Image (tube, rainbow, N blue to C red):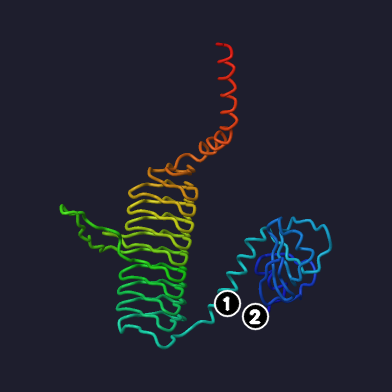
């Protein structure tokens, strides 16, 4: 697909500087882009490449002042990074709109139903009473269990598993290998030291506009629902246990683990490899630093770090003091020596 710079400018509400008819057919990083590619400049670290890149068109901030002449056509916008993200989204949507129909071999149960303009890839399996909304794309190797509802404009990438009775809203993206609705980790200890499995009869509910990375696992509730609320974004390789709730527009980075029945508020940010024990409440707007171990409730808006996690500002002060310990030790020894000399 080839587009002139003028059309791209319309999509991002930008202003053209240079040849408005310059055409692009793909995207490229500003330091590597070739003729016919579109790039962008948002990070000042890459400023030098603006004057040497071979890209045909570049998106830049409207207040950027040129230091040297630029060969490429410029498209000036308020926020270059956001505008470029918008274009990538539009480009991906155009590509996915071309995916329609049902590939063979695939299995669709007689009681399963699907809407218009869907794509069902080869070796996908749709169980009894599955419902698939309009414009949803199901890539090869996806398994969808009994009584699962998947809304409109969703994308389930290759190898995704949605286990029975789970409910997905609209505009959801789930990346390859993720498992939704596997059993929660529930076992009752017995007097003889053995464990008896507690049946997990709940489900997982994923609301609109959620994106979930590759190889993430979200366990079904013991009773009730594990809930991922609207606009939440989850990275790759995350474990979310049974009966967890993640609030609106919260984000969780890779390799984090959230134990059972913990409630994550709205707008929370959780760093990579953080671990949160069960039955806690993380307040709205809280921030949990990478590799933190959270064992207590966190108040709204508070930032924590460390294991066990504690106040982020206090942690910075402690780090600053710890760096001074060698000097403080030296001074203490000098004082001890001076005192001993006085005693002598």
Residue at (73, 62) in percent of width and height: 76
The residue lying furthest to the right in this view is: 69
| Residue 342 or residue 233, whichever sits in front | 342
Going from N to C along the chain, the mark reached first, 2 or 1, is: 2
Find numbered disc 2 in the image and state the secondary structure of the residue it sits on: loop
Tell me if mark 2 has few (under 14), some (14-19) or many (20+) residues whose alpha carbon lies within 10 angstroms of its own: few
Residue at the spot of label 2:
1
Whether label 2 touches label 1, CB < 8 Å: yes
In the rendered structure, find residue 94 and report the number of the disc placed on it.
1
Residue 59: image quadrant is bottom right
Q: Position of residue 227 (x, y in %)?
A: 37, 59
In the rendered structure, find residue 307 and report the number of the disc placed on it.
none
Q: Position of residue 197 (x, y in %)?
A: 22, 61
Find numbered disc 1 in the image and state the secondary structure of the residue it sits on: helix
Query: Which image quarter holds the N terminus?
Result: bottom right
Residue at (32, 58) in percent of width and height: 242
| Residue 121 or residue 271, whichever sits in front | 271
Label 2 to label 1, Cα distance in Å? 9 Å
Q: Position of residue 15 (x, y in %)?
A: 74, 65
């Amino acid at each position: 697909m080839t587009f002139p710079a003028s059309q791209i400018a319309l999509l991002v509400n930008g202003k053209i500087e240079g040849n408005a008819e310059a055409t692009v057919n793909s995207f490229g990083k500003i330091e590597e882009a070739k003729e016919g590619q579109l790039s962008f400049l948002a990070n000042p670290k890459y400023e030098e490449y603006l004057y040497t890149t071979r890209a045909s068109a570049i998106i830049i901030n409207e207040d950027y002042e040129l230091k040297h002449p630029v060969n490429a056509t410029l498209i000036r916008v308020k926020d270059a990074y956001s505008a470029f993200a918008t274009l990538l989204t539009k480009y991906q949507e155009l590509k996915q709109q071309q995916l329609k129909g049902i590939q063979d071999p695939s299995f669709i149960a007689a009681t399963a139903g699907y809407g218009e303009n869907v794509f069902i890839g080869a070796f996908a399996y749709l169980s009894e009473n599955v419902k698939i909304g309009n414009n949803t794309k199901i890539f090869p190797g996806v398994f969808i269990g009994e009584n699962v509802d998947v809304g409109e404009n969703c994308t389930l990438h290759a190898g995704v598993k949605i286990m029975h009775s789970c409910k997905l809203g609209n505009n959801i993206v789930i990346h390859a290998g993720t498992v939704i609705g596997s059993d929660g980790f529930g076992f009752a200890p017995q007097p003889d030291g053995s464990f008896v499995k507690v049946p997990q009869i709940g489900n997982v509910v994923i609301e609109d506009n959620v994106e979930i990375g590759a190889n993430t696992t979200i366990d079904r509730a013991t009773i009730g629902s594990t809930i991922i609320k609207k606009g939440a974004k989850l990275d790759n390789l995350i474990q979310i246990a049974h009966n967890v709730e993640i609030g609106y527009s919260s984000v969780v980075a890779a390799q984090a683990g959230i134990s059972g029945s913990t409630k994550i508020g709205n707008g929370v940010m959780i760093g990579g490899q953080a671990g949160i024990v069960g039955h806690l409440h993380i307040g709205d707007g809280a921030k949990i630093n990478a590799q933190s171990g959270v064992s207590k409730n966190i108040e709204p808006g508070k930032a924590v770090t460390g294991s066990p996690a504690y106040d982020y500002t206090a942690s910075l002060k402690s780090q600053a003091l710890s760096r001074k310990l060698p000097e403080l030790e030296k001074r203490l020894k000098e004082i001890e020596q001076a005192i001993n000399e006085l005693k002598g």
